[in-house]
């Protein structure tokens, strides 16, 4: 994959303070005319982090996509502190393009404390080399793959993605609503825990919506369905190092009434559960 396509995502996500508790996020890599939801989540997260001065780290975020934003325009974020105690703080961030409110999110912060601990094991093998080999075999057996729009998009994104099962992720046949992909930044972005959580937040909106569509033989971008993210939530369990590979295992337990629900977990190479993600999306059939 050519390095000419690599985008400095840490620069794209670095919001600029333009007034008290008001920030602007620059335009980022687009997948079409609509603003990528993961970009708004990551920029909004860093905007709320800019007001934190007590060493707390974000442990959860809950975002709502209110209107389709433009990928060609910057977003202005205004941050409101809803509560701030010794252990926790909660902030709301609202994103606008012009006078249009397109995005709203709450972020909860927590100091590091000791306590009881447990986590579920990875549901897939942690063998990234096997996944890379499977992807190369799939490409060799599917000569038309290089012309698929999703392949071109993935090659140009700042997050490198290797599917565990390419047929499930990239094929067009109906299948079980469960997938897994390996993800990492193409370029390392340092050890800042706030930036690392923002990078994971950005990636968490990639290859996620399609879980709810898999049993129906459709994929995002199909002319058979109108798809969009409605809301998105992330819980951070550990600070990721997103310059290293992470397994994003996801599934859809339900779909109905033109909506689909997706859930997923990020695991690092040591098998640690790093973050959990949920999202509901619009999947309205087109006649």
Image: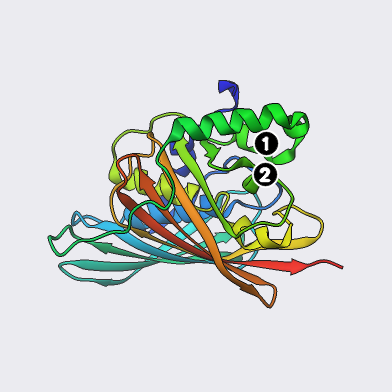
Q: Residue at x 36, y 58 (%)?
A: 48
Q: Are marks 2 and 1 in contact (CB under 8 Å)?
A: yes
Circle 2: element type: helix
Let me know if residue 243 appears in the view: yes
Per the model, the C-alpha gap separating discs 2 and 1 is: 9 Å
Residue 153, by quadrant, is top right
Q: In the figure, 18 relative to 99: above or below? A: above
The x and y percentages for residue 221 are 74, 52
Residue 43 appears left or right of 169 = left
Seen from this angle, which residue lies furthest bottom? 257
Foreground: 238 or 38? 238
Figure quadrant of the N terminus? top right
The x and y percentages for residue 92 are 40, 68
Seen from this angle, which residue lies furthest left? 114
Q: Which mark is residue 268?
A: none
Q: Quick one: label 1, few (<14), some, or many (20+) residues within 10 Å?
A: few
Foreground: 85 or 108? 108
Q: Which residue is mark 1?
A: 151
Q: Residue at x 59, y 22 (%)?
A: 4
The x and y percentages for residue 183 are 47, 40
Circle 1: element type: helix
Q: Residue at x 46, y 30 (%)?
A: 129
Foreground: 19 or 270? 270
Q: Which residue is mark 2?
A: 170
Residue 254, by quadrant, is bottom right
Figure quadrant of the C terminus? bottom right
Q: Quick one: label 2, few (<14), some, or many (20+) residues within 10 Å?
A: some
Seen from this angle, which residue lies furthest right? 287
Foreground: 70 or 113? 113
Let me know if residue 72 appears in the view: no
Q: Which mark's residue is nearer the viewer, 2 or 1?
A: 2
């Amino acid at each position: 994959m050519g390095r000419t396509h690599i985008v400095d995502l840490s620069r794209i996500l670095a919001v600029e303070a333009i007034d008290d508790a008001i920030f602007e996020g620059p335009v980022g890599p687009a997948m079409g005319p609509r603003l990528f939801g993961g970009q708004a989540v990551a920029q909004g997260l860093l905007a709320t982090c800019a007001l934190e001065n007590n060493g707390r780290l974000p442990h959860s975020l809950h975002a709502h996509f209110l209107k389709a934003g433009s990928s060609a325009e910057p977003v202005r974020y205004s941050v409101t502190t809803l509560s701030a105690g010794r252990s926790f703080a909660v902030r709301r961030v609202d994103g606008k393009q012009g006078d249009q409110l397109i995005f709203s999110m709450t972020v909860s912060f927590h100091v590091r404390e000791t306590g009881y601990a447990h986590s579920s094991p990875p549901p897939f093998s942690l063998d990234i080399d096997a996944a890379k080999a499977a992807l190369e075999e799939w490409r060799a057996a599917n000569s038309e793959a290089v012309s698929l729009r999703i392949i071109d998009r993935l090659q140009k994104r700042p997050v490198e993605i290797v599917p565990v099962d390419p047929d499930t992720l990239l094929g067009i046949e109906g299948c079980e609503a469960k997938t897994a992909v390996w993800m990492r930044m193409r370029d390392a972005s340092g050890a800042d825990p706030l930036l690392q959580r923002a990078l994971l937040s950005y990636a968490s909106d990639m290859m996620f919506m399609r879980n709810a569509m898999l049993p129906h033989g459709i994929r995002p971008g199909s002319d058979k369905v109108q798809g969009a993210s409605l809301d998105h939530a992330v819980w951070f369990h550990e600070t990721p190092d997103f310059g290293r590979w992470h397994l994003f295992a996801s599934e859809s337990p339900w779909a109905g009434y033109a909506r689909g629900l997706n859930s997923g977990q990020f695991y690092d190479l040591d098998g640690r559960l790093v973050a959990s993600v949920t999202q509901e999306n619009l999947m309205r059939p087109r006649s």
